[in-house]
């Protein structure tokens, strides 16, 4: 596990399981880069609960190198079926699908 901070990710918002979440920019890169654990704060609740959103790489074996992360957040993307976090590096874009949430 490698923890990093992506300033470009901080403050981005998304909806998941009928709640609104604001990402903090803190990211744990796990499972050899195949899983991103992103810290978030609930924005549509008075308590402002915190949670971790887990994004898994769309194509196993095609993931970030935890030893060479840098700050490469590209964008959040939403389709009818899923939400994605895209990470862009030279000549490659990695697409991570939001898979689950764990309350802290």
Image (cartoon, rainbow, N blue to C red):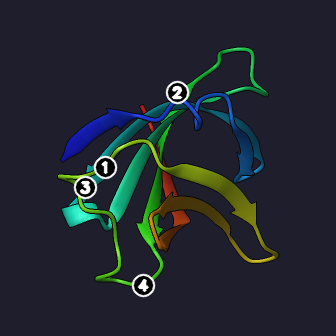
Q: Residue furthest front?
A: 90
Q: Residues within 10 Å of mark 1 (few under 14, many from 20)?
A: some
Disc with the residue nearer the chain's start (4 vs 2): 2
* Residue 95, percent from left and from top: 53, 71
Position of 25 relative to 83 (above/below): above
Picture coordinates of residue 87 (x, y %)? 51, 59
Please provide percent x and percent y for residue 25.
50, 32
**Residue to which mark 2 is pinned:** 50
Task: Assign a secondary structure to mark 3.
Answer: strand
Q: Residue at x 42, y 84 (%)?
A: 59
- Label 2 residue SS: strand
Mark 4 secondary-structure assignment: loop
Separation of residues labelled 3 and 4 (CA atoms): 15 Å
- The residue shown at (64%, 19%) is 48
Sequence-earlier tag: 3 or 4: 3
Determine the CA span between mark 4 and mark 2. 28 Å
**Residue tagged by mark 3?**
30
Q: CA distance from mark 3 to mark 1?
A: 12 Å
What residue did someone put label 1 on? 69
The answer for how far apart the CA atoms under marks 4 and 1 are is: 18 Å
| Residue corresponding to mark 4 | 59
Q: Pointer 2 and pointer 3: residues touching (CB < 8 Å)? A: no
How busy is the neighbourhood of tag 4: few (under 14 within 10 Å), some, or many (20 plus)? few
Indicate which label's residue lies in the foreground, 4 or 1. Answer: 1
Image marks 4 and 1: residues in contact by CB distance under 8 Å: no
Mark in the foreground, 3 or 1: 1
């Amino acid at each position: 596990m490698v923890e990093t901070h992506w300033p470009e990710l901080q403050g981005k918002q998304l909806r998941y399981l009928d709640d609104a979440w604001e990402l903090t920019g803190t990211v744990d890169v796990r499972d050899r880069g195949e899983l991103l654990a992103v810290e978030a704060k609930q924005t549509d609740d008075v308590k402002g609960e915190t949670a971790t959103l887990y994004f898994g790489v769309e194509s196993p074996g095609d993931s970030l190198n935890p030893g060479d992360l840098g700050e490469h957040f590209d964008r959040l993307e939403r389709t009818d079926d899923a939400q994605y976090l895209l990470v862009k590096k030279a000549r490659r874009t990695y697409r991570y699908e939001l898979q689950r949430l764990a309350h802290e």
